[in-house]
Image (cartoon, rainbow, N blue to C red):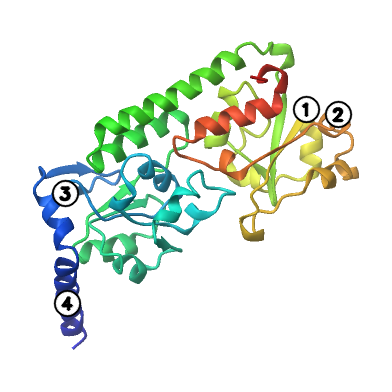
Amino acid sequence: MKKYISLLFILIYGCFLLSGCCSQTAKADNLKSYEVIDTKGNSVKMKGKPMRIVSLTLGTDEIIMDLVPAERIVGLTCLSDDPGISHISERSKQIKGKINGNNVEAILALNPDLVIIADWWDSKVMTTLRDMGIPVYVYKTPYSLDEVRTSIKEVAELVGEEEKGQKVIRKFAEKLEAVKKKAEKIPVSEEKNIIALVPHGGFGAKGSMFNDMCKFAHVRNRIGDLEPQLAQTLSKEQIVAMNPDAFVIPTWDGGGMMKAATKEELLQDKALATTNAIKNKDIVEVPGRCVYTISQYVADGVEILAAGIYPKYFKD
């Protein structure tokens, strides 16, 4: 009986999908079909450019919003509307469908013809969606500036917008080049040691996007050689021993879950009083969207980070 009900549900859903999206499907079928391979090695077959895209990570939210018109997107993550972490918070309001967590029912209700999902998502979600006949592309989470370029290129190919993808990549590269020219003027003797602080320790350990951003901005990340688990449990004693020249504080609090100490609280923290950062009152507050981003907007993050730490070299 359970198998019968499941089969019936699939048939009903299939009919609903065909009837509810016939105009979009017809438009897609007039285009050339193609096939892409995702990061897990899965073949994703498209019958034409996807017309009802659902993105389940903020990184791909930001990428596809710069690749396709809003009418081709039916779902983004709920974080896309949060200006504290999203670069597209104003534009994302055009998209009514917002997904919170791994709510499969909410995803299915959007009748997607493509779902883009991160490689860290529960595989059960991917399997369920595929079982419903929905193309699912597993996206590799980028951890470096070079990997961001690759991500943009692959997502652009996925949605049938290679030319637009190249434009986004060029703009990304141009921004980074502008930062590079300014950062190269910073004498080695003036390069600063920094530690980015989050509620439970340090942020930006070995292999992280933030660590790569620091290298590009000529910033010496004091926890850049630490494994993630060690950085996340960084004690104040360890911070004092590392003696950073500046502290970086992401201002996004993630609904209270990512709330870090304020500049005023750090300046009054006696346990950190001997560090150069506190002695010189060198605490740089940066928007969360600039340090947590993994899309093309990481270029803006690098610029804001560098400008906050080396203001005299980034005045114009």
Question: Helix, strand, or loop for circle 4?
Answer: helix
Q: Residues within 10 Å of mark 1 (few under 14, many from 20)?
A: many
Q: Residue furthest bottom?
A: 1
Q: Kindly report the distance in space between the C-alpha atoms of the residues bearing marks 2 and 1.
A: 8 Å
Residue at screen point 58% across, 39% down: 291
Residue type indicated by callout 3: Met
Residue type indicated by callout 1: Asp
Answer yes or no: do the residues labelled 2 and 1 have beta carbons within 8 Å?
yes
Quadrant in the rendering for residue 10: bottom left
Mark 3 or mark 2: name the one nearer the start of the chain.
3
Q: Kindly report the distance in space between the C-alpha atoms of the residues bearing marks 4 and 2.
A: 66 Å
Q: Residues within 10 Å of mark 2 (few under 14, many from 20)?
A: few
Q: Nearer the viewer, mark 1 or mark 4?
A: 4
The image quadrant where one finds the C terminus is: top right
Report the residue marked by disc 4: 12
Q: Nearer the viewer, mark 4 or mark 2?
A: 4
Report the residue marked by disc 2: 280
- The location of residue 273, given as percent across then percent down, is 89, 38
Picture disc at residue 165: none
- The location of residue 42, given as percent across then percent down, is 22, 48
Residue at screen point 30% across, 60% down: 126
Answer yes or no: do the residues labelled 3 and 4 have beta carbons within 8 Å?
no
Q: Kindly report the distance in space between the C-alpha atoms of the residues bearing marks 3 and 4.
A: 22 Å
Answer yes or no: do the residues labelled 1 and 3 have beta carbons within 8 Å?
no
Residue type indicated by callout 2: Asn
Q: Kindly report the distance in space between the C-alpha atoms of the residues bearing marks 3 and 2.
A: 57 Å
- The location of residue 226, given as percent across then percent down, is 62, 36
Report the residue marked by disc 3: 46
The image quadrant where one finds the N terminus is: bottom left
Residue type indicated by callout 4: Ile
Question: Helix, strand, or loop for circle 3?
Answer: strand
3 relative to 107, above or below? below
